[in-house]
Image (spheres, rainbow, N blue to C red):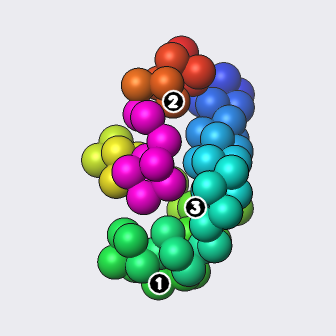
Amino acid sequence: MQLVRDREKKLRELLREARLDRELRQVDVAESLGRPQSYVAKVESGERTLDFIEVLDYCKAVQLDPTSLVKTLS
């Protein structure tokens, strides 16, 4: 179970890093996803998890190749 939590944490870190690398604010990503800013904050803090489709949408919003994300997490 710890491995799963570690990978979830790594996923959050990678998504946040991608957002920051592109100089996007949480509100920018939220608007792209059609969600409130609090959604992005909760994802990044670990308060909310993402299902696979949501991860793909998030990757698109932060311009992150989902293939590279999967490779990093594997």
Q: Quadrant of the N terminus?
A: top right
Residue 25's quadrant in the figure? bottom right
The answer to if 68 sits in the magenta stretch is: no
Please, which residue is most extreme toward the left here?
A: 53
Q: Which residue is mark 3?
A: 43
The residues tagged by marks 1 and 3 sit, at their Cα atoms, a distance apart of 12 Å
Q: Position of residue 18 (x, y in %)?
A: 62, 48
Q: Which residue is mark 2?
A: 69
Residue 21 showing in the rendered view: yes
Residue 55 vs 71, above or below: the answer is: below
Residue pictured at 46% horizontal, 48% vertical: 63
Residue 11 vs 15, above or below: the answer is: above
Residue pictured at 48% horizontal, 42% vertical: 64
Which stretch appears magenta?
Answer: 58-66
Q: Which sits in the foreground, 67 or 9? A: 67
Earlier along the polypeptide chain: callout 3 or callout 2? 3
Residue pictured at 68% horizontal, 51% vertical: 21
Residue 68 vs 43, above or below: the answer is: above
